[in-house]
Image: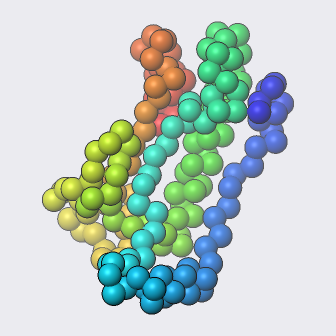
Amino acid sequence: MINEASDLEKLKIPQIIYDEKSTIADFEEANDLFGDILDVRLNGINYISFHFMSSYCHLRGLEQMMYDLYDNPDMVHNAMRFFKVGYDSLIDQCLAQNLFSYNNDDTYHSSGGIGYSYELAHKDFIAGKPRTCDLWASAESQEMVQVSTDMHEEFVMQYE
């Protein structure tokens, strides 16, 4: 929980640690068990969503977030900047470790859509090495439905 602005300083940017050896062992075990009846596939991260205000509300509460927009806007901006830096770091880590999988198939996206598309991956894609421009992603901020478009721009859109 974020009870006061200083609590934001306790948040840390997550580090992704991928254990390829264990992943391959688990995949091989699943394939041995189910490969005769199911198509066992090894997929990476194929669902990308960034919902910074939702993250803030989970830590602060929806009602308090509404008060913060008026009473403590600097704290909200600081939190949104932190979430953006953190999310950008997660994306960079996934790219560096080649953890993404293409999602232009029957992958579930956001509010119920699926990713079938002939326009993704990008025309100059590199097989087996998805980049963010090759993938579906989603962002939304349902928590902000009750505020003005100006406030939505100020507190959400500039960060997402």
Q: Position of residue 51 (x, y in %)?
A: 51, 37
Q: Position of residue 57 (x, y in %)?
A: 63, 28
The colour scheme is rainbow
Whether 96 is drawn above or below 64: the answer is below
Q: Residue at x 62, y 48 (%)?
A: 86
Q: Is residue 44 left or right of residue 7?
A: left
Residue 111 or 79: which is nearer the viewer?
111
The quadrant the N terminus occupies is top right
Q: Position of residue 124 (x, y in %)?
A: 24, 68
Q: Residue at x 68, y 61 (%)?
A: 15
Q: Position of residue 122 (x, y in %)?
A: 25, 62
Q: Is residue 49 left or right of residue 39?
A: right
Work out which residue is located at the far left of the displayed protein and give it. Answer: 118
Q: Is residue 111 left or right of residue 57?
A: left
Q: Is residue 99 left or right of residue 20?
A: left
Whether 52 is drawn above or below 63: the answer is below
Q: Is residue 142 visible?
A: yes
Quarter assignment of residue 67? top right
Q: Is residue 24 visible?
A: no
Whether 129 is drawn above or below 92: the answer is below
Q: Residue at x 32, y 81 (%)?
A: 37
Q: Please give the count of numbered marks on the rendered protein.
A: 0
